Image (cartoon, rainbow, N blue to C red):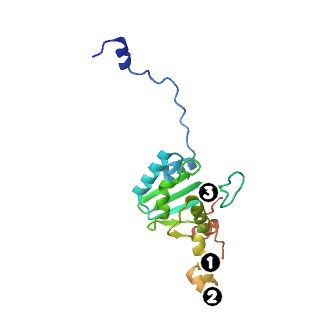
Amino acid sequence: VETSSVGNLRRKKPPAHTKKLPKKVELSKYEQFMKEKLKVHYIATEEDIIAASRHLRTLAPTKIGLDFETASKNGNFGLTNGSIRLIQIGVDEPGIAPEQFVIDCHRVSPDRILSLLTSKKVEKQIQNLTFEQSWAITHLGVQIKNIYDPMHAWREIHKKLKTMSPEEVEAIIPGYEPHSNSLAGLAYAGLNIVLPK
């Protein structure tokens, strides 16, 4: 047992925290929904991307929603001039609670999740696959596999509907009215949901 004054000082408990703790800020209903129900994970560090890739492997989804947000580079925009700003991955299927992963590609490399994009076992649901596919090939060096694109699917359905009589269409889709194949148009027609931009 050390009896010197230095040793005694070392063993003393640190003083109680004297700074006032910040007031607990009440979350808005939207913020609470984002945090608790959607489980949005913002990924901006190497530790974040490691944890996210492990967590995604644990979840083992059979399908994901996938979306890229892009940015201009030095004032120039376009496939060869811009950059991928965010990769957004949504998981929501039976047995897996909804979770969203937002990867900030300007802060951390998305390399650890690229195997998810190229996996044939995991369906990627992408609105307008041409955009994401071209950016993935150009900027990530990978080709996204196993894609379901509602826009493309609706184009094929619409082609078939145009060859049918109004009575046949009504029997298949009661109350059908032509609509756009944009995400907002499809969400409103199929789910009666108005999506804000």
Task: Assess disc 1: are there few (<14), some (14-19) or many (≥20) residues with their C-alpha within 10 Å of its C-alpha.
Answer: few
| Disc with the residue nearer the chain's start (2 vs 1) | 2
Label 1 near label 2: C-beta < 8 Å? no
Task: Identify the disc placed on residue 176.
Answer: 1
Question: Label 3 belongs to which residue?
Answer: 69
Depth check: give the residue in front, 120 or 33: 120
Give the quarter of the figure containing the C terminus.
bottom right
Q: Residue 29: x percent and y percent?
A: 56, 48
Task: Assess disc 3: are there few (<14), some (14-19) or many (≥20) residues with their C-alpha within 10 Å of its C-alpha.
Answer: few
Which secondary structure, mark 2? loop
Residue drawn at x 50%, y 55% is 111
Give the alpha-carbon distance from disc 3 to disc 1, as whole Å: 33 Å
Task: Identify the disc placed on residue 165.
Answer: 2
Residue drawn at x 58%, y 79% is 173
Residue 21 in sight here: yes
Q: Residue 55: x percent and y percent?
A: 43, 53
| Disc with the residue nearer the chain's start (3 vs 2) | 3
Depth check: give the residue in front, 71 or 173: 71
